[in-house]
Amino acid sequence: MRTVPARPRSGGGQATLAGSVLAGNRVTTFELFFDLVYVFVLTKVTGAMAHHHDAVSVLRGLLLLALVWFSWSAYAWLGNQARADPGVVRAGMTLAMAGMFVVALAVPEAWHDTPGGLSGPVVLAAAYLSVRCVHLVLYSVLARGDHDLVRQVAVSSAPVLAGAGLLLTGALVGGEVQTVFVAVAILVDWGGVYLTSRRGNWRIHDAGWFAERHELFMIIAIGESLLAMGAGAADQAVTGPLLAAAVLGVAVALGLWWLYFDVAALHGEHRLRGAADSERLGLAVRAYGYAHFPIVAGVVLTALGVEGVVAHADGGEPLGGFYAAALCGGPAVYLTGLVLFGRIMHRSWSPVRLGALIPLLAWSPVAATLSPVAGLAGVVLVLAAVASAETRRYADLRRDLRPI
């Protein structure tokens, strides 16, 4: 992990309790430990989508993923306010970890409660509500002495609690209506926080730390795709097609890593560091809080597709529409998120990445009729072509961002 020089606090706020425990020059091991619980939730969401094997399950999985992502993003902002290791922050984040672990356990029953025991949807909603409430309490404690920040936390609490209330109501109502309640809850939460935050009084104490926090989460999330691949290979005999699928699956994960980390992440961090205080907050909210969601969603969908390929690599049957859509749609959503990220941070579109969406989407119906390994190979070729084109296109920028 890189060590970056600490920046002066932005926003001109008064001294706060965080003044003695400001986010340091690097992400802590406790924060990485915290992230592992969230990645466990991602694996459960991927497994739930694969189990039900239909478009509705994918939609519901993405709704759950939106809840998970926005919760994690909230704690990333908290970590930029104060270090995660000392006292009250560590205690609060420990409670949040426990709450998210409960969320993960309830994911398989998020929409259909299993007879016996507690109601899965209600347990998930209640655990999620506790995680968000802990975050608000911690932020309120850390903001003491900074009146603008206290007001910002109070204003943002309204959509957060309203969204959580809708989520809990949907869990109590159940049935198909629950999906509508969850979708509206997300719109209220995301929309309300966006409207109150883009020109609000949140603080970016260390732009380098903030960018690195997201980068490290992305590494762990991409690693989740390898875990999904391993799950797909469970209880299978080692055969030639299985090994080919495994190698190609690693190549896809490498492609996702390259697209984010080779230039995009460094360029984004450089832009965030250099932005004026008045601009930095808006960039952080839009580019990291919101544009990163399709990036993470693309990783999860790609993991779902690769898991299906590995699970059926030696079956002798075509890949089928469900896994082909995930296999090709995942990288397409991932690229879309990266394009939005670049547009927000640098006010430019990436023609190479936009152009790659066409072959990816066109390959989906073809891949559905081919063997799983052949379908995966086509995706690898598209990602390799993007990597090759961008290696040439951004050679000078890469040298500037990675000085020897």
Image: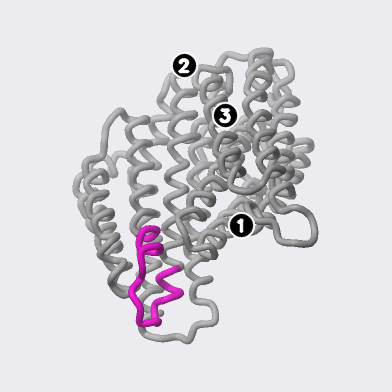
Of tags 1 and 2, the one toward the viewer is 1
Q: Is residue 3 above or below residue 137?
A: below
| Residue at disc 3, secondary structure | helix
Distance of label 1 from label 2 (alpha carbons): 36 Å
Indicate which disc residue 278 carries.
2
| Residue at disc 1, secondary structure | helix
Which residue matches tag 3?
188
Which residue matches tag 1?
40
Residue 36 figure quarter: bottom right
The magenta span reads 308-327
Queried whether the magenta region covers residue 318, the answer comes back as: yes
The answer to whether 260 appears left or right of 290 in the picture is: left
Q: Residues within 10 Å of mark 2 (few under 14, many from 20)?
A: few
User: Residue 305 location, x and y as percent?
Assistant: 41, 63
- Which of disc 3 and disc 2 is earlier in sequence? 3
Indicate which disc residue 233 carries.
none
Q: Is residue 67 above or below residue 110?
A: above
Q: Residues within 10 Å of mark 1 (few under 14, many from 20)?
A: some
Q: Which residue type carries mark 1?
A: Phe
For image coordinates 40% across by 60% down, the residue present is 253
Of tags 3 and 1, the one toward the viewer is 3
User: Residue 285 location, x and y as percent?
Assistant: 49, 29
